[in-house]
Amino acid sequence: MGRWGGSGPGGVSSFGGALNSSSGVVYHSAVGSDDELRLWYGSPTILDQWVHHLLH
C-alpha cells in the first residue's frame, strides 16, 4: 500500500471480495517523485503492476 494506505493493518481497509494489492512504500502523489527511489502509483514499474486491472 502507499504511504497513506499503509498506516494500518492490511485487512482493515479492505472490502470483502475485493482484489487487494501491496506494492511496498508507494506514494499517492507524483510530487517529489523521481520514478527510481521515491515511487508513486504512476511510476512505470508500479503502474505495470496494477493498471491492467482497470483494462479488464
Image (cartoon, rainbow, N blue to C red):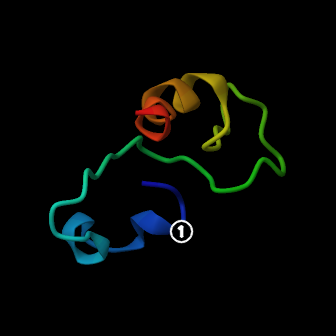
12 lies above or below 39 = below
In the displayed orientation, state which residue is furthest to the left: 17
Residue at 41% over, 37% down: 53
Residue at 48% over, 40% down: 54
In the displayed orientation, state which residue is furthest to the right: 31
Q: Is residue 6 left or right of residue 11?
A: right
Residue at 62% over, 52% down: 27
20 lies above or below 42 = below
Q: Position of residue 11 (x, y in %)?
A: 20, 68
The foreground one among 31 and 16 is 16
State the residue position of label 1: 4
Name the quadrant of the N terminus: bottom left
11 lies above or below 38 = below
In the displayed orientation, state which residue is furthest to the front: 56
Q: Residues within 10 Å of mark 1 (few under 14, many from 20)?
A: few
29 lies above or below 45 = below
Residue at 54% over, 60% down: 3
Q: Position of residue 2 (x, y in %)?
A: 50, 55
Q: Position of residue 45 (x, y in %)?
A: 56, 23
Q: Is residue 27 left or right of residue 49?
A: right
The foreground one among 52 and 36 is 52
Q: Image quarter for residue 38?
A: top right
Name the quadrant of the C terminus: top left
Q: Secondary structure at mark 1?
A: loop
Q: Amino acid at mark 1?
A: Trp
